[in-house]
Image (cartoon, rainbow, N blue to C red):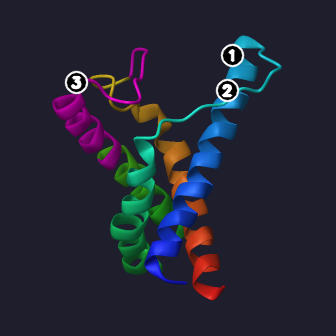
Amino acid sequence: MDAPIRAIAYVCFFVTLEIVYTAIKALVKRHDLRLIGNTQVWVMPLYALGGLYIFEPIYRMSAGNPIFVRFLIYGIGILTVEYIAGFIFKKIVGRCPWEYHGKWNIQGLINPPYLPLWGFVGLVFEKLYQFLLII
């Protein structure tokens, strides 16, 4: 599958994943049975470009490594991209589209305890990328 189509697939998949995640989080934290999830339009280019130009190359370079190593690479990589992108958004737009709260957040841009979640998301990305290459 060509890169522009993969970019669209990354946006569709990860926006959907984010909406489902935020709906489940609202259910668990606030007992909101409406299952209302959300995302921001700002993340769409991050998902498209990050998928093509950051995580596809990382996958190709790390594919031979054990799963735990790849898990850590993705977790740290996503936190790093999230911090840099959030910092740039704050400079250009005046605020970051996502804002973390709580005692472990760093400048509201990242939340290091999310590293396991981001590592898992990276492993999901691998499967999506592999699938997109064969269809």
In front of the other: label 1 or label 3?
Answer: 3
Q: Which mark is residue 29?
A: 1
Instruction: Please tell me whether mark 1 sits on a helix, a strand or a loop.
Output: helix
Tell me where residue 24 appears, x and y as whole percent: 72, 30
Q: CA distance from mark 1 to mark 3?
A: 29 Å
The residue depicted at 33 percent of the width and 23 percent of the height is 108
Residue with the mark numbered 2:
25
Quarter holding residue 89: top left
The three-letter code of the residue at mark 3 reads Gly
Q: Which mark is residue 94?
A: 3
Let me know if residue 23 is in the magenta part. Answer: no
Callout 1 touching callout 3 (CB < 8 Å): no
Instruction: Please tell me whether mark 2 sits on a helix, a strand or a loop.
Output: helix
Callout 1 touching callout 2 (CB < 8 Å): yes
The three-letter code of the residue at mark 2 reads Lys
Residue closest to the eye, 81 or 6: 6
